[in-house]
Image (cartoon, coloured by chain):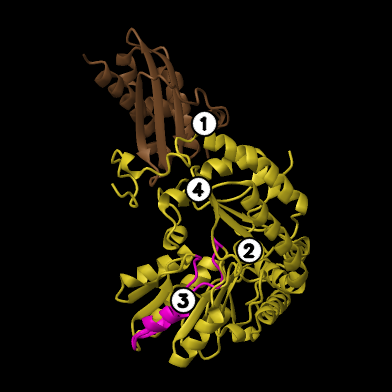
Chain colours: A brown, B yellow
Amino acid sequence: MYSEKVMDHFANPRNVGEIPDADGIGEVGNPVCGDIMKIYIKVKDDVITDIKFKTFGCGAAIATSSMVTEMARGKTLEEAMKLSNKQVAEALDGLPPQKMHCSNLAADALHAAIADYRKKHSA
Amino acid sequence: MRRVYFDHSATTPVHPRVAEEMYRFLTDSNYGNPTSLHYFGRIARQAVEEAREKVARAIGADPREIVFTSGGTESDNMAIHGIAYTNRNRGNHIITSAVEHHAVLNTVKALGKQGFTVTILPVDQYGMVSVDEVAEAITDKTILITIMHANNEVGTIMPIAEIGKLAKEKGIIFHTDAVQSFGKIPVNVDELGVDLLSISGHKFYGPKGVGALYIRKGTRWKQTLFHGGAQERLRRAGTENVPGIIGLGKAAELAVENMAAENEMLQALRDKLIREVKNRFKHVRLTGHPVLRLPNHASFCFEYIEGESMLLSLDMKGVAASSGSACTSGSLEPSHVLLAMGIPPEVAHGSIRLTLGKDNTEEDVDYFLEVMEPIVERLRSMSPLSEETGYDLDRCNGCRISHTCRA
């Protein structure tokens, strides 16, 4: 059983799509495991100004992707790096125990996108 | 909202005539314990024995060969465990298939840890067991073959009569789980050549919590799991579930009565469903055998999307279906049945099962097709996977959550 918030984010996911000229792209998961999340970010003055996602996965995977994009938008990179899996799950009023790995993936995908940005812009 | 129930392999509604019969045994003075000698007990006893006759008649058995249980899982456990321990002096080898229901597979695996050796036969791409492979697996230690009649996830009907013939020639006891087949295709214990056979009431418009095990007269089987009173002629201890048993009897009688007419209708709906899904959607595969499948059963894998997302989306439109996807099973592994059929895990995650029933109509099928199109389109548009990307397996970040993970 999912919370109403999870169902809302599953039915009306925020920020779905791709950013063609993204400053950073993060991808985690594997189709064999049944989950892939891909997060695209635009960054200006160390702040995430735009963020989008594409996800292959279950209801929780889609809802956590949607939630993490909402939570990260407008945050500085430093703040966004501190967003934890637990916070994503809590923001959705919790996840069933066997779905907790989905929330891990969402925060990991965000952190991977930031790492990708930093790698490209380290010079 | 329109509600369409396409999950009859999970459970069926109780037939109103079954409910009526059961109600009589929940009310008035029909509450007796069938073991009691007095008037109240005799009423219950007579009704239980009538139900036994109905179940026996439905599968071509003698009423004395029917034992009432709490359902398919108990029937399977009781059959397999009982045969294994009663025949331990003759051998310790058990043959089963990779696509059995967990009630069979996990029972056999548990025996594998108790000194029995187990052969789990592979299946072909349709989920079918090969009779030749059963023959090759038999050793002089083989005491039991247990192979399901029809598969619950993909609907494939196994060559049970041929395996039955083989088992008889070799003198090996043969059990089949007929939980999905009974009521949908003819099930006759002599034609199938089985020594034990499991059925479950709620799969054919009977109540939940009641089933039966057929045990052929003369089979070396003893109750090895339940200890207690002498009910069911020492074969199953515990006061009989009288209303459940009466419901089971009535449901079995109705199932046989209505099978021919229902099947014609169901098969037409199923064929339309399969045909239209193939017509309307790209990157979808039918799972299970194209012809030798249950008349009410359609199952597919939709590529690049995940099963639970499909189920949730369908449910929001009022359509009830099920999936063998990892996410719906409570574990992280996709269906053992689909994997055994050689379907890659990444595709098995996109599985969906639609099982029709007597109250479904052509409008239900049309409604499903109508709502399914935008669902698949939406989920695919959200998915980072597509025909273009394929399933690029090099992208794994080594999460190692799943046992099927190749990273």
Task: Name the spot of residue B85 as percent of width and height, x first.
Answer: 38, 80
Residue B130 marker: 3
* In this view, the mark in front (1 or 3): 3
Q: CA distance from mark 2 to mark 4?
A: 25 Å
* Tally of marks: 4
Q: Label 4 is placed on what type of residue?
A: Gly
The lab-note entry on whether marks 1 and 3 share a chain reads no
Task: Name the spot of residue B73 as percent of width and height, x first.
Answer: 51, 66
Q: CA distance from mark 4 to mark 1?
A: 20 Å
Q: Chain of mark 2?
A: B
Residue A62 on the magenta span: no
Which sits earlier in the primary sequence, circle 3 or circle 4? 3
Identify which residue is drawn at 56% across, 82% down: B161
Residue wearing tag 2: B203
Q: Image height check: is B387 above or below B337?
A: above
Q: Label 2 is placed on what type of residue?
A: Lys
Q: Nearest the camera: B200 or A101?
A: A101
The lab-note entry on whether marks 4 and 1 share a chain reads no
Q: Nearest the camera: B246 or B313?
A: B313
User: Magenta residues?
Assistant: B126-154
Task: Name the spot of residue B272 as percent of width and height, x first.
Answer: 70, 56
Mark 2, Cα crowd under 10 Å, few <14 / some 14-19 / many 20+, is many
User: Which image quadrant is residue A117 in?
Assistant: top left
Q: Image height check: is B210 above or below B85?
A: above
Q: CA distance from mark 3 to mark 4?
A: 27 Å
- In the image, taking residue B70 as reference, residue B24 lies left or right, namely right
Mark 4, Cα crowd under 10 Å, few <14 / some 14-19 / many 20+, is many
Which sits earlier in the primary sequence, circle 2 or circle 4? 2
Residue wearing tag 4: B350
Residue wearing tag 1: A6
